[in-house]
Image (tube, grey):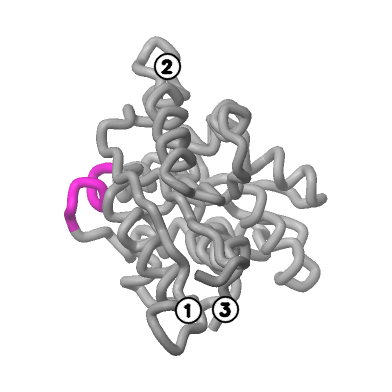
Amino acid sequence: MDENRKILGIIGGIGPLATVYFMNLVVKKTKADKDQDHIPMIVLNDTLIPDRTDFILDDKKPDPAVRMISDAKKLEENGADVIVMPCNTAHFFYDEISKEISVPMINIVDETVKYASENIPGIKKLGILATMGTVYSGSYRRCCDKYGLECVVPSEEDQKNLMTIIYGQVKAGKKADTKLLMKIIDNLENDGCDAVVMGCTELSVVNEDMNLNRKDIIDSMEVLAEKSILACGGRLN
């Protein structure tokens, strides 16, 4: 193996469909002429990790960090050089997990906001589509502050509808209401947002199905996939 090529460890199962989509993105976005040009990946598709939003909103619920730390350690023990979590909400636990391992861990939230600040000309306001757990945790707001951007989240009604799309539709294996999702995006842009982040990996799956290909819609999963490829010594298409 190329000595510069590193192994990517993936804490998966949060959710399962998003994990598969992330792996597919890594393969599709890697410039490769043969199998050996692709990034080696170790995936722990741990569907038994408790719901992240449930715990963030009520810390009496089961703590997901316990299993995620255990999973990160297992990935490191089995050869992972870089670790990722294809789940925005799970990054509430990023510091807690990363301090328990000795290999680097890519932060999807920080990388996504950084991407927006560097690639959207004149950006001032960034809309965030995410779970209530992510919104409540303030992870995107803190990163926006770091890069000098105003963080905007949907109205209470739009956030409720967004949670229905994420949990009641995508996670439940049902067809997403794309018209409703587009209405939520339009409302954020009417509120002055220069770009909108798909800040939930379930929404990344919907984004692919919609095939919007709009520069003002930033897919956090695509950002994570590209950063993962580069961190492991691969080349981008």
Helix, strand or loop status at disc 1: helix
Residue type at tag 3: Leu
Residue 13: x, y in percent? 31, 44
Q: Earlier in the sequence, mark 3 or mark 2?
A: 2
Q: Separation of disc 1 and disc 2 at Cα? A: 44 Å
What amino acid is found at the position of numbered circle 2 in the picture? Asp
Q: How far from the left and from the top, in percent, is residue 117?
A: 75, 61
- Look at discs 3 and 2 and give the one toward the viewer: 3
Helix, strand or loop at label 2? It is loop
Residue 173, magenta (yes or no):
yes
**Secondary structure under the numbered disc 3 in the rendered image:** loop
Q: Which residue is mark 2?
A: 58
Look at the picture and state if 144 lies above or below 32: above
Tell me where residue 95 appears, x and y as whole percent. 62, 31
**Of residues 65 and 3, which is closer to you in this image?**
3
Q: Residues within 10 Å of mark 1 (few under 14, many from 20)?
A: some
Left or right of 70, for residue 47: left
Q: Which residue is mark 3?
A: 236
Which range is magenta? 167-174
Residue visible at 47% across and 48% down in the picture: 79
Name the residue carrying label 1: 37
Marks 1/3 in contact by CB < 8 Å: the verdict is no
Number of callouts = 3
Q: Give the percent coordinates (x, y) of residue 126.
A: 66, 55
Return the disc, 1 or 2, that comes first in the chain's sequence: 1
Mark before the other along the chain sequence, 1 or 3: 1
